[in-house]
Amino acid sequence: MNPVYTLTKGMLPVETIYCPGCTHGISHRIIMEVLEEVDMLGKTIGCGPIGCSVLAHRYMNVDMLECPHGRAPAVASAIKRVHPDNFVFTYQGDGDLASIGTAEIIHAAARGEKITTFFINNAIYGMTGGQMAPTTLIGQKSTTSQSGRTVEQAGAPMRICELIANLDGAVYVERVALNTAGNISKAKRAVRRAYDIQEKRLGFSLIEFVSSCPTHWGKSPVESMQHLKEKMLPYYPLGVYKEPEGGEV
């Protein structure tokens, strides 16, 4: 019998702590699959901050560092400058990247740091208890917006790809989703392109993964995927927001 699915060498064979229906595991796998395919597992350094992905080092079979909340881009920038031949990435959620770490990600992109950021956008704080995040949708309920987010109280949700794409140092910015097999395949292609851009030292790249959080959305895994499609994607459209001139890598 020919196997149709095998565990990539980039993932460690341990039990996950992620909730049923969480898409962190999918993003972990496709990132590590790409690094295995390009034979870079032994030359990769990942920077994981505070959040649900705080234990990503238990799953990703590469060198990993824990960073202070929001500061992964600063740590990754320093590592890349010291080890320019390594693939260096940050793996950040929306509460981390778009809130406490806003200054870090904007200035890393503005400087054109030759790192890659994988940004998980599930529109909620996960690990800390389901608080409203900068990407929480209007009307969405959370532990700190129990009647639903309003523009008057919290402003409009932040669109990170659109923001980062305006910075000269950012050379590749794309938003993908993890809700269907087709979108997951597109997400993997985006990860590979981000790797190629870093290998050629063209500048900063960011891949945003529109993701689910069944636990803090108060939905089943199936309902969460429907919510992602019907509510998240209209506000966070998928696509390439910036790419190298000519589109060639």
Image: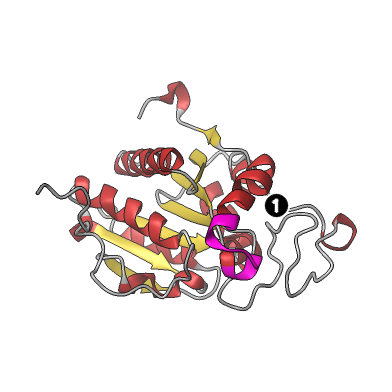
Which residue reaches farthest right?
Answer: 152
Classify 216 as above or below 80: below
For the point 34% across and 51% down, which residue is it?
30
Extreme residue toward the front, this view: 1
Q: Position of residue 153 (x, y in %)?
A: 87, 63
Q: Where is residue 202 shown, x and y percent of the image?
A: 39, 38
Residue 82 locus on image (x, y percent): 31, 61
Residue 1 lies within the magenta run: no
Q: Where, quadrant-wise, is the C terminus in this rendering?
A: top left
Residue 83: image quadrant is: bottom left
User: What amino acid is found at the position of numbered circle 1 in the picture?
Assistant: Met
Q: Out of 157 and 104, give the one closest to the viewer.
A: 157
Q: Is residue 125 visible?
A: no
Residue 133 appears in the rendering? yes
Q: Residue 234 location, x and y as percent?
A: 68, 40
Q: Report which residue position mark 1 lands on.
A: 158
Query: Between 91 and 225, which is closer to the camera in this rendering?
Result: 225
Q: Is residue 167 above or below residue 225?
A: above
